[in-house]
Amino acid sequence: MTVPPAPGPSSRALVPTRLGWDAAVIAVVGLTLALAWLADPPQPAGGLLLLAGIGLLVGAYLGFFRLWRPVPAARAEAGGTAGAQPESAPRMWGFVAAAAVALTLACAASPDGAFLQALAYPVLWTLAVRVRDAVIGCVVIGLAVCVGMLISTGSLVAASASGLVSLGFAIAMGLWISRIAEYGNERAALVDELVAAQETVRALSAAQGASAERERLARDIHDTLAQTLAGLVLLSERAAAQARRGEPADAAATMDTVERTAREALAEAREIVARTAAVPADATLGQALQRLAERFRVETGLVVHIDGTEALPTLDPETQVVLLRCAQEALANVRKHAAARRARLELSSDAAQIVLTVADDGQGFDPAASRHGFGLDGMRERVALSGGTFEVVAAPGEGTRLTVRLPLRERAAEVDA
């Protein structure tokens, strides 16, 4: 069993800080000295031997662990204990050798020297690259404790009990902490993947939002400015023809219409720039459609009838914009393609929906045939975004009937009232 590499914050959280290690060393050494001299003071030679063991262990801690500043590199591919680096393998075995000698000396001087295991085992597990290496190191240190205790106590049972119990506890704790580190590393990897996925989703959402905004602007420009400019071209051609035929009064009337239409185009452009609703705040949908039909009559000379605008429910701005844009595009298609004599706009509603129907008596077309224009597809997409349905019924020589159905949503202010 190995612990997979995870240099993230989860594994670092399991490793005490350097100041924490220093405090632990001071506490273990102080406790060992206190127990050794207060309970059963050793002989001078034994005291020197105990101090030598403590000094060797502290030196091993400083040389192989405390003063080593690891570079921020990933751990071995085979895995390691929490906080270990692949460069720590030689240092670990150096520490194991020094700690084994130190514990042998300390335990041989006094049985209380066995308390130094509380420092040796944690440092060993922290330095170990592989769990297998850590277990082997624990066995080496445990045997050193047994040898030292056997020298000081002369009892094989006491020496074995002291060393083996500590060894079993150290291995069990080390494996448990390694499992915790492994679990934390897996969770950290999952969190990193989640954060990366969230960043990807955020980037895709931003790109989708920008694309949707571009499509919206394209629809608005096509349904407003493009149609109005097309009407201006027709009116300008009519005025020029009237002037060439010597009809100044008719040409002047046509130019008045050009001026009025151009002002409307300017207002539409300002509305698009300001991202406001295309239907003026002080006008109803019926009034906007009446103006649209009147302008269409002036531009084309066709007869346009409007029905059902008198008893409409109060509509929210979004629904009004969609209906007006669809009416504009439908009449523009009649002007460009239908060769019709008459057109009819009809509005109707019930408790659930409002319906706009635009019909003409023109030459019609085949809805299944391929198209190159943007008009019908733009209307269908606009209606779909508003939760409605869009239908075109047409046949060559039989005219065209376009139907838009939108869910009926009243203005929020009036609903609240």
Image (cartoon, helix red, strand yellow):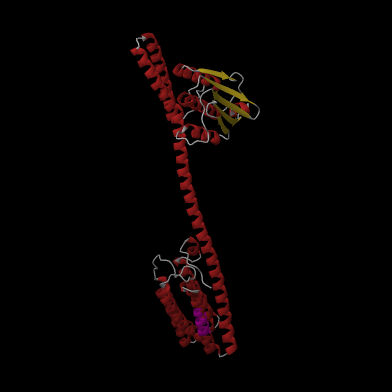
* Vertical placement of residue 251 versus 50, above or below: above
Closest to the observer: 235 or 266? 235
Residue stretch in magenta: 136-145
Q: Where residue 135 sits: x, y (%)?
A: 52, 78
Look at 52% across and 27% down and name the residue there.
364
Q: Main secondary structure of the magenta part?
A: helix
Among all residues in the image, which is located at the extreme front?
397
Q: In the image, is residue 250 part of the stretch drawn in magenta?
A: no
Look at 42% across and 17% down and name the residue there.
260
Look at 50% across and 84% down and name the residue there.
144
Among all residues in the image, which is located at the extreme left?
244
Q: Where residue 126 sits: x, y (%)?
A: 48, 71
Q: Where residue 309 sits: x, y (%)?
A: 58, 20
Residue 282 visible? The answer is no
Q: Where residue 72 sits: x, y (%)?
A: 40, 65
Closest to the observer: 9 or 291? 291
Q: How many marks?
A: 0
* Vertical placement of residue 92 versus 201, above or below: below
Among all residues in the image, which is located at the extreme right?
351
Closest to the observer: 165 or 228? 228
Q: In the image, is residue 140 part of the stretch drawn in magenta?
A: yes
Residue 77 occupies which quadrant of the picture? bottom left
* Vertical placement of residue 386 versus 187, above or below: above
Residue 74 visible? The answer is yes
